[in-house]
Amino acid sequence: MSSNSSKMPIQVWVLTLAAFAIGTAEFVIAGLLTQVSHSLNISEGQAGSLITAYALAIVIGGPVLTIWLSRYEKRTVLWLLMAVFVGANVMTALSSDYSVLLVSRAIAGLTQGPFYGIGAVVATRLVASGMEGRAVGQMFAGLTLANVLGVPAGSWIGNQYGWSTAFLIVAALGVLALLAIIVSIKRQGTEQSVSLINQLAVFRNRNLLASLMFTVLGWAGFMAFYGYIAPIAEQVAGFDSTMLTAVLVVVGIGLVVGNSLGARTADANLRFSLMFWPAAMIVTLIAAGLVAPYKWPFLVTAFLFGIASFANVPSMQMRVMKHGGKAPELAATANISAFNLANALGGVIGGIVVDSHWGAAAIPFAAAAIPLLGVLFIVSQEAAGKATRPAAIA
């Protein structure tokens, strides 16, 4: 039930904490990529496969798990997912074999899609009408805070005490989130079970499918750039490895600003938000590529990239949820899968480019290519009248 207060309820902040733990687990590898590759004696492109394995687990496993879990009480599902998440990150921390790391990362990834999808639905039900975009944005602010605090801290801890210590701390964050969910979030009550056929029927909605496709195309550039920001900053911009934490903090601050701006523009004008922010991300990627050899201009454009990239999240998630019909959790989780299919695609693109003769300097330009297709796709959908009408999405 929605809150009558204009303030964000504490339960949404608890979901933010959980998203912070999960986001740190997902993105901390970006600050540890070079260290992991040296520790395991593999290339940076191979180390980037840890990003891809995590993302593909979300893409494939997320919707399947959500279909199964949607019949159960939501608070119980959320804390059980966090318990599995904790175990997977302990497994990662204790592993020294590349194959085991891939498996543990995949297990952690399996929990993310259902948690974000179900958690986003719970968040919208905790706030007043008209605040749904901000509730989703608040929950996903955990991701941005993970990049401001979790990823830089994890990078610093990894450089000081070894990368496995960083994942042990991620597991500890997961325990805190698990306990907070049990203590603060009330049972959501029993809902009428929706059959498998009726849940899958939401994918007959052309607007939903177009939204998912747009998420994949519009978001792919994020991980292609962010997942390989360490080699770009060190090899091209000339930052010392000790400065990498500062670079990640600057980008993370941009992510926080972007998430807040994106949540407000999603509530105000969803169609505008859907087209403006991906275009802005493309511009910042190209700019970052042009100024990459220069430290401070690169830092400025990386900050602007942070703003433009995470401003996409609330609007992309809200559009999908509005077309979720009788299975909003499945639709929301499908969009998390779409985000992570984009992450996997971006990880593959970045890995190919960084190991090629073009090297890290070419990554920003390669990262801009797929989002450009996304912008052209959504514009063509609107022009052809196939996208959702303004009254339905604004």
Image (tube, rainbow, N blue to C red):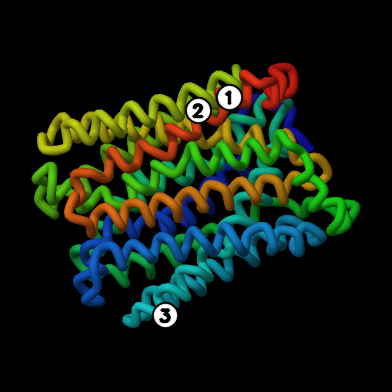
Residue 108 appears at what percent x and percent y?
A: 51, 66
Q: Quadrant of residue 384?
A: top right
Q: Nearer the viewer, mark 2 or mark 3?
A: 2
Residue at horizontal 72 percent and vertical 62 percent from the top: 76
Name the residue beneath numbered marker 1: 380
Q: Amino acid at mark 2?
A: Leu
Q: Amino acid at mark 3?
A: Val
Secondary structure beneath disc 2? helix
Residue at horizontal 49 percent and vertical 56 percent from the top: 22
Do the numbered discs 1 and 2 sit on residues whose CB atoms are within 8 Å? yes
Relative placement, left or right, of 356 versus 69 is: left
Q: Amino acid at mark 1?
A: Ser
| Image quarter in which the N terminus is found | top right
Residue 67 appears at what percent x and percent y?
A: 75, 59
Residue at horizontal 27 percent and vertical 61 percent from the top: 32
Q: Measure the alpha-carbon separation of dots 1 and 2.
A: 6 Å
Instruction: Let me know if residue 119 appears in the view.
Output: no
Relative placement, left or right, of 5 versus 295 is: right
Q: Measure the alpha-carbon separation of dots 1 and 3.
A: 44 Å
The tag on residue 376 is 2
Residue at horizontal 35 percent and vertical 78 percent from the top: 98
The tag on residue 62 is none
- In front: 337, or 4? 337
